[in-house]
Image: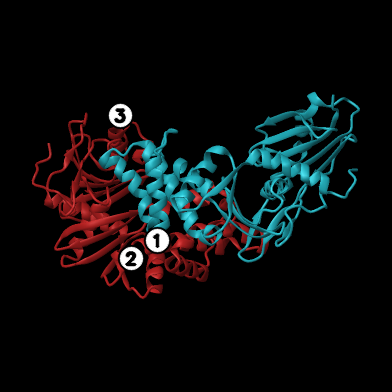
Chain colours: A cyan, B red
Amino acid sequence: MSRLDWIAVDWGTSSLRAWGIGTDGSVLWAESSPTGMGGLAPEQFEPTFLALVAPHVGPSERIEAIACGMVGARQGWAEAGYRAVPCTPLSPDLTAAPTSDPRLSFRIIGGLSQADPADVMRGEETQIAGFQALNPKFDGVICLPGTHSKWVHVSAGEVVSFQTFMTGELFAALAGHTVLRHSVGGEDWDDDAFAEAVDDAVSRPEKLAARLFGLRAEGLLNGLPAAAARARLSGLLIGAELAAARPYWLGQNIAIVGATGISGRYGAALSGLGVTATLADGDAMVLKGLIAARSNTTEIPT
Amino acid sequence: MSRLDWIAVDWGTSSLRAWGIGTDGSVLWAESSPTGMGGLAPEQFEPTFLALVAPHVGPSERIEAIACGMVGARQGWAEAGYRAVPCTPLSPDLTAAPTSDPRLSFRIIGGLSQADPADVMRGEETQIAGFQALNPKFDGVICLPGTHSKWVHVSAGEVVSFQTFMTGELFAALAGHTVLRHSVGGEDWDDDAFAEAVDDAVSRPEKLAARLFGLRAEGLLNGLPAAAARARLSGLLIGAELAAARPYWLGQNIAIVGATGISGRYGAALSGLGVTATLADGDAMVLKGLIAARSNTTEIPT
């Protein structure tokens, strides 16, 4: 049986996940908790991490961890700076976080930045590296949908340029903190309403601002069902993203890396525009990227 | 000295305002409170209103009130239905709210609706009527900026068509409930950043979705000041509204009815597009509209 070699960590704003990797490279265990770095004070990072992995490590066992995500932001455990594109997604240099427990080495992967237009990513670089590990010859565009969707042009193993869209967060803010909350409740979904809204937003992006209140008005006057309103709001926002991201998908080789539900919606939206995209699982790519980061690093953990 | 004749009331989601109108038509007093109808249960409407006006009415004095705003919504004191445009902004028929106090008559002005594109207004019809009372021959477009901005085509004394934009609420949701809250804090303002953002959004509306996260990234990478980020966010959203509302302002006679600050911004944005607009004070127009509603009604208060 394989022994624990190191721990792969994805620590974002709202969740913490860890995978125990054995000496033979297999995943021995996985843990997750809602203790995202967004809710922690600096002195809580180390005990929070140690508590999560405690069931899997002996009292005198060395603990080597490599992490990606917002844990490396200025407000995180230790700031792992941004590297400017064009560059490979991963640097051989990792940032060591300060630790009290002498058993623990905790190193963090840095993010990427772009000067013009100004943009940043943190966490997605690891998913990109994971995708590249699986598809070493990939040349094209990776779309990573989510709270902050990214469109990333990748060529010859490097990230060439990228663009961030706040689409997921915009949906949550509109659905949760405006009058539209009365119209888009529940989890039901209407595929046709989604497809029509994507098409409308892509072909008439200048009308976007005029469409939003219509969801509320159609509910009041015509009884528009929540499933249709919800799907239409999502379609309008994803359509607006696609209208603005056109140079990233037009005539390009596209891969979508993300969770199944949202990736499927982006795939359907692109399909409506005549673009075929390949889907890859976001969680699997994070883990592959963390494994790539460890084999890539030239440092010795201290 | 003039005696109290009736009470004009503007009761919106977040505030309640009342003006005592004398037998000679003068305003005898004004009261306001943050007890908007959004925070009240049905049984609280009557006591809340009576408490606000109590200092100004005798124990056996008749109280006649005419109100506009969300107090007439389905969740309000009594539902005052929508009338479909084209029609005059005010109907001679008002909706009487149920009252327990035998001294009180409380009547509510109904809203307006439009079938296609589906749209509704409630409260703005009274401001429009006030503006018409002051400018009886006005033919053109009234812009009412705010939480839900309205563009209203008025001709021959009737509302012909209108369109609602959630611009104010969208700004509040983005500035308060997304990652942009870190970038747009404070009340400072940069006029040039506003003008550039309006121009950008009007001329390249398809790029809107790509601009939003840039406010955050420019803060992180280039230290974009909050005043510029705040003004740019406002300019992008108002610009998106103007791009979608183009048929309402292109070659039209425009009046802006609203609060001074936001009206000035819309005026500046339109000016940058070569359109001159006349500004009218929103509060004054509400009061004039309520007065017009009372002289317009054929009903006898019960």
Q: What is the x, y in percent for residue A285?
A: 68, 42
- Secondary structure, mark 3, is helix
Horizontal placement of A45 versus A231: left or right? right
- Name which of mark 3 and mark 2 comes first in the sequence: 3
Q: Disc 3 marks which amino acid?
A: Glu
- Secondary structure, mark 2, is helix
Q: Residues within 10 Å of mark 1 (few under 14, many from 20)?
A: many
Cα distance in 3D space between marks 3 and 2: 44 Å
Q: What is the x, y in percent for residue A88?
A: 74, 56
User: Which quadrant does the C terminus of chain B fall into?
Assistant: top left
Q: Which residue is mark 1?
A: A206
Q: Residues within 10 Å of mark 3 (few under 14, many from 20)?
A: few
Q: Chain of mark 3?
A: B
Cα distance in 3D space between marks 3 and 1: 44 Å
Q: Residue at x 37, y 70 (%)?
A: B270
Q: Which residue is mark 2?
A: B246
**On the image, which quarter does residue A35 sit in?**
top right
- Secondary structure, mark 1, is helix
Marks 3 and 1 share the same chain: no
Q: Which residue is mark 3?
A: B43
**On the image, which quarter does residue B104 sit in?**
top left
Viewer-side label of 3, 1: 1
